[in-house]
Image (cartoon, rainbow, N blue to C red):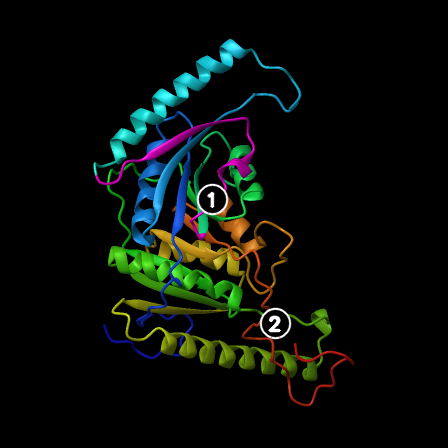
């Protein structure tokens, strides 16, 4: 499929092709399920992601103590009954999704320690799939889901409980938000592999940041000129970045659109774009250019996870320290910067 240049409009949706591979990494996709019917939704989406990435799928269920005190003794008979019931449920669930060629492994784990499901040897990275609880507000993801987000070092696949139940999940349009940083671009190779397997369209979304200056209603003419100059520069850098990204993804045979939005809250622009662009899978990096590596996920990812109506795959690069960003060299001509700084 042929790629087209990005047009200079407020919201563009131009196709461009991409292929970036995934460096040969093979994921171990672990579907963390409870014993409710919603678990079938998690497994359906996890299976599609595992197939697309050429990885293995397994099921995990935690038999929790039901108490916050880890030292509290548990009734061994009650514990054994719960464990047996969970085993029966997982066995039945696995039989619905496995095939003769690909049997589905499952495991019942005791306690609530998320680190028990970290990827075993032989797998390059781990994806933990889970569901946002139906018993909590739409603006939160629930206690169990939060433990997975905070406790898992691997990538995350959140499946909202509101998604339709389908035996064979397919994706036709995948959204990848980019802020110009190499951190955000970590999601591209994974999204490309899924799109190639699903014959889906990729939508790359970039939101140029809004420039705010201190000054309030009494802004001087020079302040407004500076603001306009920085806005124009950001728009130019964003366009150049999109063009470079487009050029690097040519020749993949995958249909790709580029959407460039000017200004606004990136979190809400992503949320709005999911609906306006009819997205059915969101693939994004856990951290962007402004994210701190000592927190599990960045502010944008956390916002999206708590509000999304579609499955979200959060790609993590825990050891990355590259802070390169498309706007890191942006500066206004003729303006003296504080000593020791190099850009805006």
Left or right: residue 141 versus residue 338 is left
In the image, residue 158 sits, relative to residue 77, either above or below, namely below
User: Nearest the camera: 96 or 4?
Assistant: 96
Tell me the quadrant of the picture where the C terminus can be found.
bottom right
At which x and y percent is residue 133? 46, 33
Can residue 162 be seen here? no
At which x and y percent is residue 35? 40, 25
Q: Residue furthest right?
A: 339
Task: Please give the range of residues in magenta.
Answer: 101-124
Q: Residue at x 56, y 11 (%)?
A: 75
Total marks placed: 2
In the image, residue 60 sits, relative to residue 196, either above or below, namely above
**Dot placed on the residue nearer the N-terminal end, 2 or 1:** 1
Indicate yes or no whether the magenta region holds residue 252. Answer: no
Q: Which residue is mark 2?
A: 211
User: Nearest the camera: 121 or 68?
Assistant: 121
Q: Which residue is mark 1?
A: 119
Can residue 233 be seen here? yes
User: Nearest the camera: 99 or 247?
Assistant: 99
Q: Residue 339 is drawn in which quadrant?
A: bottom right
Q: Residue at x 54, y 49 (%)?
A: 302
Tell me the quadrant of the picture where the N terminus can be found.
bottom left
Residue contact at pointers 2 and 1, CB within 8 angstroms: no
Q: Residue furthest front?
A: 121
Q: Residue 103 is drawn in which quadrant?
A: top left
Q: Residue at x 57, y 69 (%)?
A: 210
At which x and y percent is residue 271? 45, 54
In the image, residue 226 sits, relative to residue 43, either above or below, namely below
What secondary structure is marked by label 2?
loop
Left or right: residue 54 versus residue 72 is left
């Amino acid at each position: 499929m042929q790629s087209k240049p990005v047009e200079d409009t407020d919201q563009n949706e131009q196709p461009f092709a991409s292929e970036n591979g995934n460096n040969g990494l093979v994921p171990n996709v672990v579907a963390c399920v409870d014993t409710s019917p919603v678990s079938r939704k998690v497994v359906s989406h996890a299976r599609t992601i595992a197939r697309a990435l050429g990885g293995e799928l397994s099921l995990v269920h935690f038999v929790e103590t039901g108490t916050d005190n880890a030292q509290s003794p548990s009734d061994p008979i009650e514990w054994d009954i719960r464990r047996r019931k969970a085993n029966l449920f997982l066995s039945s669930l696995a039989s619905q999704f496995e095939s003769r060629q690909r049997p589905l492994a499952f495991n019942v784990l005791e306690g609530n320690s998320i680190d028990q499901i970290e990827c075993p040897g032989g797998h390059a990275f781990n994806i933990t799939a889970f569901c946002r609880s139906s018993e909590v507000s739409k603006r939160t993801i629930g206690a169990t889901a939060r433990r997975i987000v905070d406790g898992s070092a691997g990538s995350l696949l959140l499946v909202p409980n509101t998604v339709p139940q389908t035996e064979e999940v397919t994706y036709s349009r995948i959204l990848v938000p980019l802020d110009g940083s190499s951190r955000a671009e970590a999601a591209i190779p994974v999204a490309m592999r899924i799109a190639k397997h699903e014959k889906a369209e990729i939508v790359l979304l970039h939101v140029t940041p809004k420039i705010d200056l201190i000054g309030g209603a009494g802004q001087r003419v020079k302040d407004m000129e500076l603001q306009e100059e920085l806005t124009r520069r950001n728009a130019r850098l964003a366009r150049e970045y999109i063009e470079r990204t487009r050029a690097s993804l040519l020749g993949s045979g995958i249909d790709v659109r580029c959407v460039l939005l000017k200004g606004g809250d990136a979190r809400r622009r992503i949320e709005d774009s999911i609906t306006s662009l009819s997205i059915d899978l969101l693939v994004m990096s856990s951290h962007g250019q402004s994210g701190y590596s000592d927190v599990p996920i960045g502010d944008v990812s956390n916002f999206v996870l708590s509000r999304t109506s579609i499955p979200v795959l959060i790609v993590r690069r825990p050891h990355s320290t590259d802070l390169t960003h498309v706007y890191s060299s942006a500066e206004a001509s003729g303006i003296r910067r504080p000593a020791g700084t190099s850009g805006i």
